[in-house]
Image (spheres, rainbow, N blue to C red):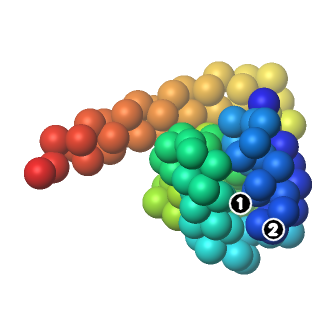
Amino acid sequence: MIFGFGPSKRNFDRIARVADGWTVNPADMQSFSDSVALLRDTFEEHGRDPRSPIVQVSVTPERRDDGTVDYGATADKARMWRDAGATIAVFRPTSFCAADDDVVQLIDWAVDLKNERSRHRSDLAAQP
């Protein structure tokens, strides 16, 4: 279970007591890194692994001047949120796809990004 509460100690106490994580409101992205740290600290205060909370962000596409999706820039944005503490990135097809054929490209791109994340985790685990 994931809650979309605003980032506060009180709300993170609630999440740490009964839920698995937090979904971030786009309005709260400015304080994202600090909020993730507070969430993890709160999980630890509740006797839970501070690395365990799910932190979900919705990633909107970056667009070129002609309106097409810039998948490279969008991937950079998703990596930035990952590096800041996101564990799940949501890509909504309605935000990315103008036509049915665009869905295949979105899925292929998202799978590549996920596989990159898996390689990133393996690299981190191999470090001393």
Q: Is residue 77 left or right of residue 15?
A: left
In the rendered view, would you say 68 is above or below 107? Answer: below
| Label 2: few (<14), some (14–19) or many (≥20) C-alpha neighbours in 10 Å | few
Quadrant in the picture for residue 12: bottom right
Identity of the amino acid at label 2? Ser
Residue 42 appears in view: yes
Q: What percent of the width, then of the height, locates residue 92? A: 79, 38
SS for dot 1: loop
Q: Residue at x 71, y 60 (%)?
A: 63
User: Quadrant location of the N terminus?
Assistant: top right
At x 15%, y 49%, the residue is: 127
- Identify residue type, mark 1: Arg
The label on residue 98 is none
Q: Residues within 10 Å of mark 1 (few under 14, many from 20)?
A: some
Residue highlighted by disc 2: 8
Where disc 2 sits, the SS reads loop
Question: Within the image, what quadrant is residue 38 found in?
Answer: bottom right
Q: Using residue 111 as the reference point, say whether residue 6 is left or right of it.
A: right
Q: Residue at x 26, y 47 (%)?
A: 124
Give the residue at the far left of this rendering: 128
Earlier residue among tags 1 and 2: 2
Residue pointed to by mark 1: 63
